[in-house]
């Protein structure tokens, strides 16, 4: 069985080969072959329409959760698309760190507590906040949202979940849930707004200027979903003007392409604002994540070889 790992994840070909063994042949490829070389499985996170039309594989395995970069409508008949999770624990920890950094206001302290800074900062120690008692609103309550909610409740925070149907309760780790249609109602009492939903036609631009204006002025926005869930221009203006307190952004509107040496992460200079914590899409990047994901991918490939249906199918074969 031949497996191609294409694009950004090609360096993980040896990892997958070791998990599968000699009965399988894994090839890392920096880009799709122009000829559309056949393979049983293609592992990649991005396939445009032209690439999809030339694919000749039975399983397109996305090495992550998001499938918005897969031109599913252009895939050939018989091709199954599956995704994989395993990222929820590190992303939840990243999110809780962002919340605690915000309420503790650690950035206000001097970077070096030396003999010069120590007397002055001790005499004027700033008062910081507490996470306990604050309300965190989660837009999305999937793998990531559930892990964030569990940790937030351990900090005695109030958790509100915004989901498609809004039918959750204490058994789901939340104090309140509302459907997306009622998002505007919960924003004014949201101390922290965490975006952890998929990007699709319903969530693109969901957090627009009107939504941002409903948040408290000192609110924190944490985006670990996709950048496009938030209207970029509206976000920049809200942060620049001080209408929104702070933002922690781990996902971006522009990503460098192979060989591209210079590219800004957004069209507006969000990364340069003093009230933005800008991180380079690292919230999930741990050794544990790679181990979990590639173990799952190897299992899915073995299932395909055994004639079983792959797990986590997001687009069934036509």
Image (cartoon, rainbow, N blue to C red):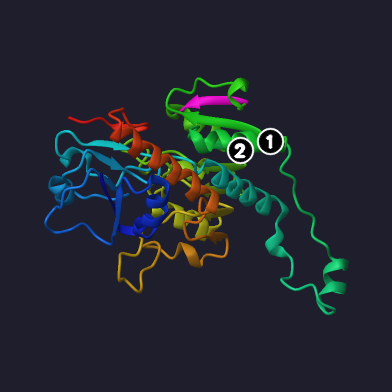
Overall secondary structure of the magenta section: strand
Q: Residue at x 65, y 38 (%)?
A: 151
Q: Residue at x 30, y 66 (%)?
A: 258
Q: Secondary structure at mark 2?
A: strand
Residue 177 within the segment the image draws in magenta: yes
Give residue 242's quadrant in the image.
bottom right
Q: Is residue 272 left or right of residue 110?
A: left
Alpha carbon separation for disc pair 2 and 1: 7 Å
Q: For mark 2, what is the residue? A: 136
Q: Are marks 2 and 1 in contact (CB under 8 Å)?
A: yes
20 w.r.t. 127: above or below:
above
* Residue at the far bottom in the pictured view: 116
Q: Is residue 123 left or right of residue 291?
A: right
Q: Which residues are magenta?
A: 175-179
Q: For mark 1, what is the residue? A: 157
Could you say which is closer to the camera, residue 104 or residue 209? 104
Could you say which is closer to the camera, residue 66 or residue 271? 66
Q: Is residue 55 left or right of residue 146?
A: left
Q: Is residue 223 visible?
A: no
């Amino acid at each position: 069985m031949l497996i191609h790992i294409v694009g950004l994840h090609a360096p993980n070909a040896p990892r997958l080969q070791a998990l599968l063994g000699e009965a399988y042949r894994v090839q890392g490829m920096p880009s799709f072959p122009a000829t559309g070389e056949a393979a049983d499985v293609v592992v990649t996170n991005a396939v445009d329409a032209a690439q999809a039309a030339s694919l000749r594989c039975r399983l397109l395995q996305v090495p992550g959760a998001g499938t918005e970069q897969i031109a599913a409508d252009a895939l050939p008949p018989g091709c199954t698309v599956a995704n994989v999770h395993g990222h929820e624990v590190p992303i939840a920890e990243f999110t809780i760190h962002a919340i605690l950094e915000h309420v503790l206001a650690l950035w206000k302290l001097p970077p070096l507590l030396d003999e010069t800074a120590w007397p002055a900062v001790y005499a004027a120690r700033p008062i910081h906040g507490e996470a306990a008692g604050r309300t965190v609103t989660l837009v999305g309550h999937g793998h990531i949202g559930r892990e964030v909610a569990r940790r937030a409740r351990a900090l005695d925070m109030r958790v509100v979940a915004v989901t498609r149907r809004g039918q959750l309760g204490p058994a789901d780790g939340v104090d309140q849930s509302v459907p997306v249609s009622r998002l505007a109602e919960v924003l004014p009492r949201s101390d922290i707004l965490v975006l952890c939903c998929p990007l699709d036609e319903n969530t693109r631009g969901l957090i627009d200027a009107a939504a941002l204006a409903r948040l408290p002025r000192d609110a924190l926005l944490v985006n670990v979903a996709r950048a496009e869930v938030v209207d970029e221009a509206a976000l920049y203006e809200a942060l620049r003007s001080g209408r929104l307190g702070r933002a922690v952004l781990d996902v971006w509107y522009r990503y460098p392409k192979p060989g591209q040496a210079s590219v800004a992460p957004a069209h507006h200079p969000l990364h340069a604002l003093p009230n933005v914590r800008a991180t380079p899409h690292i919230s999930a990047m741990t050794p544990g994540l790679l181990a979990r994901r590639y173990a799952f991918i190897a299992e899915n490939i073995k299932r395909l070889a055994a004639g079983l249906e792959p797990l986590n199918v997001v687009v069934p074969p036509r």
